[in-house]
Structures are given as structure tokens and as C-alpha cells.
């Protein structure tokens, strides 16, 4: 098992706090899971999952997953955050990330059908 610096775990907790009003959380064995967001689609309720993972050097990577037509349409939707980033930078990065997640999900087939 890979060990991380206290700074890494501190940033993960900061991210959880930042996403607490945006994402639902649940118990999971995945220690980097930040939460999920529900979307009402034409085919029923679906979820986007958001997590953080270690990246090169002193960075973490925000990642997301949302299945549409058998593919993770968020597979390339990522953001890098420095471990020692200031709060305003972390908050801006998280807001930008979630805006991109919402934009991509809203353009999926099941969401486009909701507009007709």
C-alpha cells in the first residue's frame, strides 16, 4: 500500500469539505472517494462519482466517472491541484471541475432526451 504525506491527507479532507454541498457522500472503502452527484435523466436517475488520486510530484488529480451508452464520458475530465495550494485556488479549481462535469453530463444522450 502506498503511503502519503500528511499534506496529501489534509488536502483530501479540504476537498471533502469543499464538495460537501455539491456531492452526496456515503461510506466507502475507497479512501479517496469524495462523493457522487445525482442526475435525473430520461432513462432514470444516474450518478457521477468524484474522487481524488495521487499524481506526480506534489499534486493530486480530481477525477470523475459517469456512464453513458457504456462509456465513461468523464474519463478525460480531470484537474490537478498542488498539495500546498491556497484555499482560493482549491475552491476555484473544484468549481471549474464541477462545472465541466455538469456540462458534459448535460450533453449525454439521456440528458438531451429530457429537453425534447
Image (tube, rainbow, N blue to C red):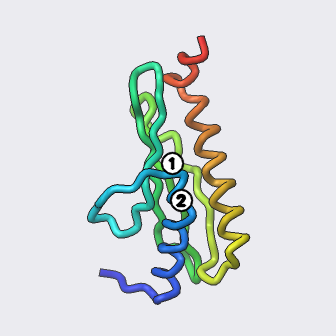
Q: Is residue 11 above or below residue 25?
A: below
* Lateral position of residue 116 relative to residue 48, left or right: right
Give the residue at x 72% y 71%.
88
Residue 11 placed where, x, y %? Answer: 53, 77
Circle 1 sits on which residue? 75
User: In the rendered view of the protein, which quadrant contains the C terminus?
Assistant: top right
Give the residue at x 43% y 55%.
35
Answer few, some or many: residues within 10 Å of disc 1's Cα (few below 14, many 20 plus, some between 14 and 19). Answer: few
Q: Is residue 69 above or below residue 17?
A: above
Circle 2 sits on which residue? 19
Please identify, in this view, whether the residue under mark 2 or under mark 1 is nearer the observer: 2
Give the residue at x 29% y 61%.
28
Residue 109 placed where, x, y %? Answer: 52, 23
Do labels 2 and 1 touch, CB within 8 Å? Answer: no
Residue in front for this viewpoint, 28 or 64? 28
Residue in front for this viewpoint, 56 or 110? 110
Give the residue at x 43% y 49%.
36
Q: CA distance from mark 2 to mark 1?
A: 19 Å
Q: Residue furthest front?
A: 21
Q: Is residue 43 above or below residue 11?
A: above
Residue 96 placed where, x, y %? Answer: 69, 54
Residue 30 placed where, x, y %? Answer: 32, 64
Q: Residue furthest left?
A: 29
Q: Which mark is residue 56?
A: none
- For residue 58, which quarter of the picture? bottom right
Amino acid at each position: 500500500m502506498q503511503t502519503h504525506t500528511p499534506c496529501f491527507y489534509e488536502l483530501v479532507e479540504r476537498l471533502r469539505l469543499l464538495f460537501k454541498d455539491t456531492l452526496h457522500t456515503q461510506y466507502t472503502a475507497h479512501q479517496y472517494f469524495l462523493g457522487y452527484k445525482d442526475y435525473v435523466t430520461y432513462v432514470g436517475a444516474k450518478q457521477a462519482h468524484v474522487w481524488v488520486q495521487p499524481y506526480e510530484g506534489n499534486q493530486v488529480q480530481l477525477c470523475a466517472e459517469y456512464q453513458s451508452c457504456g462509456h465513461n464520458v468523464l474519463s478525460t475530465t480531470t484537474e490537478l491541484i498542488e498539495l500546498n495550494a491556497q484555499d482560493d485556488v482549491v475552491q476555484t479549481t473544484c468549481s471549474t471541475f464541477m462545472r465541466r462535469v455538469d456540462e458534459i453530463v448535460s450533453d449525454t444522450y439521456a440528458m438531451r432526451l429530457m429537453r425534447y
